[in-house]
Image (cartoon, helix red, strand yellow):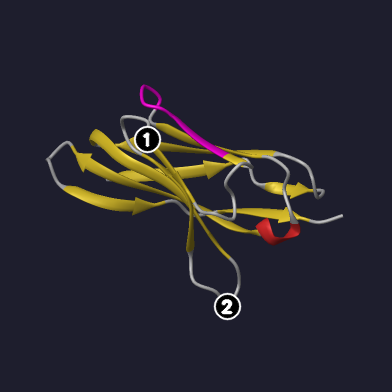
Amino acid sequence: QVQLVESGGGLVQPGGSLRLSCAASGLIFSINTMGWYRQTAGKQRELAATITSGGSTNYADSVKGRFTISRDNAKKTVYLQMNSLKPDDTAVYYCKAHVLTSTKEGRFYWGQGTQVTVSS
């Protein structure tokens, strides 16, 4: 099995910064695209940012210029550096990864989510 474990969420004032981490573990052969999604109560989960195994990135318009996604392939970890945070960024942030397992089965996995609250 594969597990994704997020960390780094919390409470921050508007204009502040947070760095989220998501570490993958288990029977992993390789990891393709990794990404961060976010969800608020009553709304659909939405894309924040993705990064391919080669380092190509994609961002939602709402976070461009403020968030930076990166990954450490050796550590099987993806990061989301969030700067200039706004109250509208308040959400549960989920990590998602497309994993090829050691048995060569490919599928998407989700983490359990980490709460980010931006408030004064």
Residue type for callout 2: Gly
Q: Which residue is drawn at the image coordinates 31% and 33% (left, top)? A: 53
On screen, residue 12 versus residue 56, left or right, reads right
Earlier in the chain: of badge 2 and badge 1, it is 2
Residue at horizontal 12%, vertical 40%?
103
Residue 24 rendering spot, x and y as whole percentages: 38, 37
The quadrant the N terminus occupies is top left
| Kind of residue sitting beneath label 1 | Ser
80 sits to left or right of 25? right
Foreground mark, 2 or 1? 1
Q: CA distance from mark 2 to mark 1?
A: 31 Å
Q: Which residue is mark 2?
A: 42
Instruction: Verify whether residue 101 appears in magenta.
Output: no
Q: Which residue sits at x=55%, y=74%?
A: 43
* Quarter holding residue 83: top right
Element class at badge 1:
loop
Which span is picked out in magenta? 68-75
> How many neighbours does mark 2 have within 10 angstroms: few (below 14), some (14-19), or many (20 or more)?
few
Main secondary-structure element of the magenta-colored stretch: strand
Q: Is residue 114 left or right of residue 56?
A: right
Q: Nearer the viewer, residue 2 or 69?
A: 69
Q: Position of residue 63 (x, y in %)?
A: 59, 50
Under tag 2, what secondary structure? loop
Say which mark, if any, is on residue 13: none
Q: Which mark is residue 56?
A: 1
15 horizontally vs 58: left or right: right
Residue furthest right in the image = 120
Are there few (<14), some (14-19), or many (20+) residues within 10 Å of tag 1? few
